[in-house]
Amino acid sequence: MKKVFPALCAVLFLGACAQGTVGSAPTQNATQASSEVATSGGVGDPRTRAKLHTELGSLYFQDGNMAVALQELGIALEIDANYAPAYNVRGLVHVYLREMEAADRDFQQALRLVGNDPEVNNNYGWFLCQSNREKESLGYFMRAIKNPLYQTPDRAYLNAGLCSLKINDLAAAEDYFQKALRVSPDNTQATFQLAGINYKRGKLEEAKKLIAAVTRRVEPNAELLWLGLRVERQLGDRAAEANYATQLRRKFSGSPEYQALLKGNFE
């Protein structure tokens, strides 16, 4: 079963992210949450029950089980039609399924209920970015960031940077990524994106330093290896270039990056 949750946690918000379940077994967590829901037996405060079903829906989303996630979120909203987090998470499920009209409706409803909530604003901004409404998305990221209670503003800065890249605004993207790093110096996505911007601008030594910083923190993926290879190629370090090529071949032979290498498409 495909695990979609860890990647989403980097740029979005789901209840289980905040609860520290990333890296644990999603199915086990969902089973535990199911047990809690069953124990409640439909008794108790509706808001508490809606919260439990929303958390369960988040965990099934994490586990890649979209049908059950939607079912649990639907139950949450049947219990409490004004529970904004359920609309928020259901919007994310719809985005993942590319059901964009349904996602828009859910995010809009969440915003009507909790218009200043930074997590909802960040998530809706990301939805807009994925809907080719990048410029519109930036206002929602900024609204999230301006909320003094927002615990993860680096996510919104990162998203603003990624959306700025989509419209080829390198200056704005660089500024947002740098702000993300000021908030969270270990944000590897922001560091990687800055490396890519420096590569595009011909600042190869700076790009190399940033790639090394990411590599020290995480296992390189195909994108990082491909960027490193192209940087070393431009710098003329054939040994380092060959090392990156070997890693791409061994670990990611089916990736688009390795196929580009085979074809000699370096840009």
Image: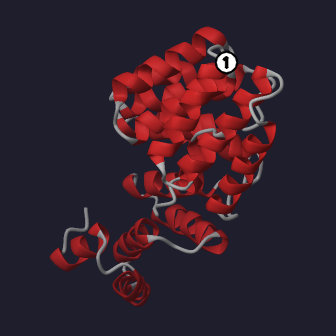
Q: Mark 1 — residue?
A: 80
> Where on the picture, by quarter, is residue 21?
bottom right
- In the image, residue 127 sits, relative to residue 193, either above or below, namely above
Q: Secondary structure at mark 1?
A: loop
Q: Quadrant of the C terminus?
A: bottom left
Residue type, mark 1 in image? Asp
Q: Quick check: 79 above or below 51?
A: above
Quadrant of residue 140 in the image? top right
Residue at the image point whose x is 38% and y is 34% from the top = 130
Q: Position of residue 258 (x, y in %)?
A: 29, 75
Camera-nearest residue between 222 and 106: 106
Q: Quadrant of residue 219?
A: bottom right
- Identify the image's colour scheme: rainbow, by chain, secondary structure or one colour: secondary structure
Residue occupying the point 42% across, 85% down: 247
Q: Can residue 91 be seen at all in this image of the molecule?
A: yes
Q: Is residue 234 above or below residue 92?
A: below
- In x, y percent, where is residue 23? 68, 63
Residue at 45% from the left image edge and 30% from the top image edge = 127
Q: Which of 97 and 160 lies nearest the eye of the viewer?
A: 97
Between residue 13 and residue 169, name the one nearer to us: 13
Q: Residue at x 51, y 59 (%)?
A: 3
Return the x and y of residue 193 as percentages of the image width and height: 50, 52
Outermost top residue: 112
Q: How many marks?
A: 1
Report the side of 152 relative to 214 (left or right).
right
Residue 1 screen position, x and y as percent:
46, 64
Q: Is residue 45 left or right of residue 221?
A: right
